[in-house]
Amino acid sequence: MSKTIRLTTAQALVKFLTAQMTLIDGKKTPIFAGCWAIFGHGNVAGLGEALFQVRDTLPTYRGQNEQSMALSAIAYAKAMNRKRIMVATTSIGPGALNMVT
C-alpha cells in the first residue's frame, strides 16, 4: 500500500508539471522549461512558494506584463520546435484575459 502524501493544490500542480517528460533525441527531457509569473491578489493558491521549492527543476521568471509573458512562452515553444514549452501564470485582472487572447 502506498503512503498518503499531503500536498497543497499548488504543490500538487507543480509536482504534476515537473513530472511531465518528453523524448528529445532519445533523451527524457522535462516538457516545461520554466514558468513566467506575476503574483498578486488573484494568484493566492501558494503557487509562488510551491514554485520556489522546485526552482532548480522548474525555474520561475518574473514577468512585467501578461502579454509579454505569453509571447515569450510562444516564442520559446516555436524555437524548441514545440517539443518543450513554458508555463505562464498571473493574477486576476484584465492582463489575465489579455494573456489568453
Image (cartoon, helix red, strand yellow):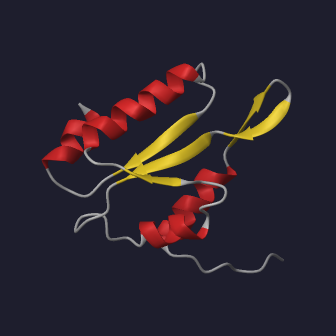
Dividing the image into 4 quarters, which one contains the C terminus? top left
> Hey, which quadrant is residue 82 in on the image?
top right
Percent coordinates x, y for residue 68 in the rendering: 30, 36
Left or right: residue 25 compared with residue 99: right
**Number of on-image labels:** 0
Along the viewing direction, whichever of 48 and 92 lies nearer the viewer: 48
Residue lying at 59% horizontally and 52% vertically, measured from the top left: 17
- Identify the residue at the far left of this view: 94
Residue lying at 26% horizontally and 36% vertically, measured from the top left: 67
Q: Is residue 89 above or below residue 26?
A: below
Residue lying at 13% horizontally and 46% vertically, measured from the top left: 94
Percent coordinates x, y for residue 50 in the rendering: 52, 69
Q: Is residue 13 above or below residue 63?
A: below
Left or right: residue 4 compared with residue 47: right
Along the viewing direction, whichever of 22 and 74 lies nearer the viewer: 74
Percent coordinates x, y for residue 38 in the rendering: 32, 56
Left or right: residue 13 compared with residue 63: right
Q: Is residue 25 above or below residue 48?
A: above
Q: Is residue 96 above or below residue 11?
A: above
Percent coordinates x, y for residue 86 in the rendering: 50, 40
Left or right: residue 24 compared with residue 63: right
Residue lying at 61% horizontally and 32% vertically, measured from the top left: 84
> Hey, which quadrant is residue 99 in on the image?
top left
Dividing the image into 4 quarters, which one contains the N terminus? bottom right
